[in-house]
Image (cartoon, rainbow, N blue to C red):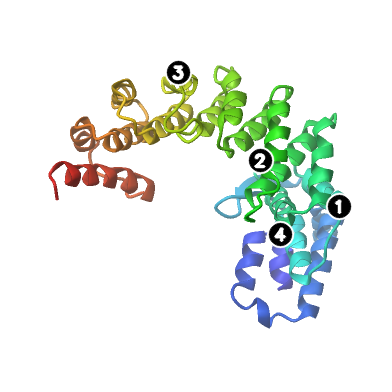
Amino acid sequence: MSEAVDSGSPALFEALLGHEIRDRSESELLGARDLARRWHETGVGAELRRRTGSGDAIVRTPVQDDEYSSVEELTLGGMTVRNGHGAILTRAEELLGVRTSFEELMDRALAHADQKNHSTWNSVTILLGGRGDEATWTAAAALRTAPDPSRRLFGAEVLRLTHLFDGSDEDAFAGPALDMFTDWSAEETDLAVLTEVLVALGEHIGPRAEAALLPHAGHPDARVRRAVAQGFSEWSSPPALSGDARTALLRLIADPDAVVRKAACGRVAGARDNDPLLADALAALLGDTDRMVQLTAVYGLALHDDERCVEAARLLGPQCGSLEEEGYLDEVRRYQWRRDGR
């Protein structure tokens, strides 16, 4: 296990644990925790220099550690290590039943705030979001007014995950989260934080969340527009998209950014109210330069029972084999079965 910790790869550490976690002795986990803490507190660069004795420049390379998280890989003196020791430490503490303080976990995550989707940031926010208690909520909410945008981003993500992970019937965090993010979205100036806040709003169903998203539909930054497009839902204003959401989506479906177009297209696809205007907007994307936008448009037309999806699917040519593409084209086949009365 020490080799996995030394590697600095949380994915390797997790794979080693596998299904044998019950067979791991407490002493092994304590050793892994202490070793990971040493790497984390000393710093990967400093520990590499101590172990190799090299004074050369350290080569740093961003790499993907698992499907969702990235780390930085450091090479010096023939030794290569990843800097995910904070995530390994967090996981070891969790397995040992140690409740690390909010402040310590936050500092651990903020050490990698400049690295997108870093494994330590992700493991910490997921752990805190899963606690689902008032103390964690209060500590995260207090960060809303922090001068440092990285702290605001951290707080917003923990709050969003706290609500998202709340599977109780009471859904106690739904109201406070909606209140918090509605007000926050009108005030936030940092793009990364604003995007996170809008993503959080999109996880709420109802006219208040929709109303808070709408002012940002024309934002100059594509990341913000993506969050808006993804946040609209046909369930926001039952039984179909509201007029304002419809207008915004028809604008976003023609956005210069392909990811925004795809997100908007997906939301229009889900609005199965047989509106010819929406179907025509989807059809206009069949000639899009981005294949995934085309596929989403084909999928939407199939959901709208629009015959144009059949020829469009044929013109797309051979499938690339991805599950997402297969799912979109399966909807065309289902439409054909409905059409032919099978």
The dot on residue 104 is 1
Disc 2 from disc 3: Cα separation: 33 Å
The dot on residue 116 is 2
* 160 shown above or below 243: below
Q: Nearer the viewer, mark 3 or mark 4?
A: 3
Q: Secondary structure at mark 4?
A: loop
Q: Nearer the viewer, mark 3 or mark 1?
A: 3
Kind of residue at badge 2: Lys
Q: Secondary structure at mark 1?
A: helix
Q: Position of residue 316 (x, y in %)?
A: 25, 36
Q: Position of residue 50 (x, y in %)?
A: 85, 59
The dot on residue 247 is 3
Q: Secondary structure at mark 2?
A: loop
Crowd class of label 1 (few under 14; some 14 to 19; many from 20; radius 10 Å): few
Kind of residue at badge 3: Thr
Q: What residue does disc 4 label?
A: 8
For marks 2 and 3, the one nearer the N-term is: 2
Q: Position of residue 306 (x, y in %)?
A: 23, 31
* 43 shown above or below 267: below
